[in-house]
Image: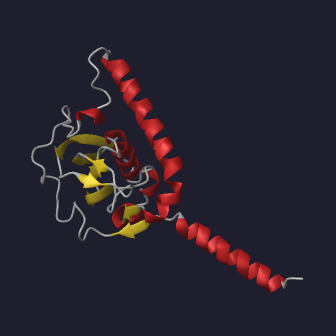
């Protein structure tokens, strides 16, 4: 017969391993693609034009659809991608990186996509009582995702978010954790927190 103490220790050990295996690693900006960037680093922002490095990532760019249908397809595809990525990515979540500032601001739960990269998919470049600026890999963290994080940030200050625009940059080709080639679109997206 096994000792109850041994059974409890084994259960505690297994529980500890399981919980840490799926916890993202918090990282600071040192050595990350967004280290030293500010809201103007990628040039002028636009509220109407978002430039994709890989045209296939622009899910709303089908010429045969109305703007409303394009928006619905974009949202649906993004939701499916996030759902599949979240489900399939669970075994890799221990390797997923998350920005420390995003965590400290209580916004980590707003970004649901697991990372297939050696850096976080989204980071907070700066924040003040009346604004927040994100850097994100737009291929995986869409504008509406950072918009939801901005809304949560501003709501904590009893204010509403106002999108101030995005600027993008095309980095060199990257390799995912599984070795596949990835052409990212890096974006800086800025929001103001306005009075209601």
Toward the left, the furthest residue is: 43
Comparing 76 with 92, the one in front is 92
User: Which residue is at 26% across, 17% downward?
Assistant: 63
Q: Position of residue 53 (x, y in %)?
A: 20, 40
User: Which residue is at 21% across, 42% downward?
Assistant: 164
Q: Quadrant of residue 25?
A: bottom left
Toward the front, the furthest residue is: 179
In the image, 101: left or right of 168?
right
In the picture, which quadrant includes the C terminus? Answer: top left
Q: Quadrant of residue 144?
A: top left
Comparing 156 with 89, the one in front is 89
In the picture, which quadrant includes the N terminus? Answer: bottom right
Q: Quadrant of residue 32?
A: bottom left
Q: How is the image coloured?
A: secondary structure
Residue 31 vertical position relative to residue 130 in the rendered view, above or below = below
Comparing 69 with 152, the one in front is 69
In the image, 155: left or right of 9?
left
In the image, 91: left or right of 133?
right
Q: How many marks?
A: 0
Residue 150 vertical position relative to residue 119 in the rendered view, above or below = above
Residue 131 visible to an observer of this rendering: no
In the image, 84: left or right of 11?
left
User: Which residue is at 54% across, 67% downward?
Assistant: 21
Q: Position of residue 155 (x, y in %)?
A: 40, 48
User: Which residue is at 35% across, 19% downward?
Assistant: 68
Q: Position of residue 180 (x, y in %)?
A: 33, 51
Comparing 78 with 157, the one in front is 78
Q: Position of residue 151 (x, y in %)?
A: 38, 45
Residue 35 visible to an observer of this rendering: yes
């Amino acid at each position: 017969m096994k000792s109850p103490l041994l059974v409890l220790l084994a259960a505690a050990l297994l529980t500890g391993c399981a919980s840490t295996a799926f916890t993202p690693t918090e990282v600071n900006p040192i050595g990350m693609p967004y280290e030293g960037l500010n809201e103007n680093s990628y040039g002028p922002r636009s509220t109407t034009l978002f430039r994709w490095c890989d045209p296939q990532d622009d899910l709303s760019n089908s010429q045969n659809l109305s703007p409303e249908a394009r928006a619905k397809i974009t949202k649906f595809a993004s939701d499916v991608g996030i759902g599949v990525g979240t489900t399939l990515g669970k075994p890799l979540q221990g390797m997923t990186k998350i920005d420390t500032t995003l965590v400290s601001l209580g916004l980590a739960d707003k970004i649901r996509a697991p990372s297939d990269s050696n850096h976080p998919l989204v980071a907070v470049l700066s924040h003040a009582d009346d604004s927040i600026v994100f850097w994100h890999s737009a291929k995986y963290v869409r504008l509406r995702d950072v918009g939801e994080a901005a809304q949560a940030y501003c709501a904590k200050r009893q204010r509403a978010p106002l999108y101030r625009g995005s600027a993008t940059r095309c980095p060199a080709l990257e390799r995912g954790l599984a070795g596949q080639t990835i052409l990212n679109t890096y974006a800086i997206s800025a929001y103001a927190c306005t009075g209601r």
